[in-house]
Image (cartoon, rainbow, N blue to C red):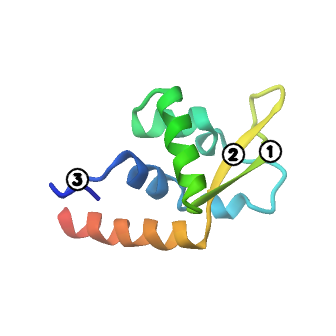
């Protein structure tokens, strides 16, 4: 979270991915957990999403896997939070709820 009380792109990605764990064992995943879907959901470019996702992965907050995404004719990377990433996302959600 930024000093001014707003959420960073990293924070928004983690909050967006908090439900992705439901698809960890599945062979398919929704588009919203792919790089394209994440970029669209938090209103950033696909290239910027790639940079942010690489940072989150390096920090151990997310992991990626290859899955079928309905509507795509090939498998793509989808992202899920690690345990640490889920904990952080849940903390951000509590903060967000307090701000509303």
Q: Is residue 3 above or below residue 34?
A: below
Query: Where residue 84 sits in the image (x, y, percent)?
Result: 54, 72
Badge 3 local density, few (<14 within 10 Å), some, or many (20+)? few
Residue at 74% across, 29% down: 71
Q: Nearer the viewer, residue 34 or 10?
A: 10
Query: Where residue 52 sits in the image (x, y, percent)?
Result: 49, 43
Label 3: state its secondary structure.
loop
Q: Nearer the viewer, residue 14 or 48?
A: 48
Could you tell me how far apart the alpha carbons at marks 3 and 2 are, in whole angstroms?
26 Å
Q: Can you identify the residue that label 2 sits on?
A: 78
Query: Where residue 29 sits in the image (x, y, percent)?
Result: 72, 48
Asked whether the residues under the numbered discs 2 and 1 touch, taking CB atoms below 8 Å apart as contact, a structural biologist would say: yes
Badge 2 local density, few (<14 within 10 Å), some, or many (20+)? many
Q: Can you identify the residue that label 1 sits on?
A: 67
Residue at 47% across, 32% down: 48
Q: Earlier in the sequence, mark 2 or mark 1?
A: 1
- Give the residue furthest to the front: 58
Q: Earlier in the sequence, mark 3 or mark 2?
A: 3
Depth-wise, is mark 1 or mark 3 nearer the camera? Answer: 3
Q: Nearer the viewer, residue 21 or 52?
A: 52
Q: Can you identify the residue that label 3 sits on?
A: 6
Q: Quadrant of the C terminus?
A: bottom left
Could you tell me how far apart the alpha carbons at marks 1 and 3 are, in whole angstroms?
32 Å
Asked whether the residues under the numbered discs 1 and 3 touch, taking CB atoms below 8 Å apart as contact, a structural biologist would say: no
Query: Where residue 47 sits in the image (x, y, percent)?
Result: 52, 27
Badge 1 local density, few (<14 within 10 Å), some, or many (20+)? many
Label 2: state its secondary structure.
strand
């Amino acid at each position: 979270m930024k000093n001014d009380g707003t959420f960073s792109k990293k924070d928004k990605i983690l909050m967006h991915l908090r439900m992705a764990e439901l698809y960890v064992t599945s062979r398919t995943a929704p588009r919203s957990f792919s790089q394209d879907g994440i970029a669209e959901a938090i209103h950033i470019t696909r290239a910027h999403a790639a940079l942010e996702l690489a940072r989150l992965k390096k920090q151990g907050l997310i992991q990626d896997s290859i899955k079928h995404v309905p509507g795509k004719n090939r498998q793509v990377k989808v992202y899920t939070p690690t345990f640490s990433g889920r904990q952080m996302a849940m903390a951000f959600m509590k903060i967000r709820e307090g701000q509303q």
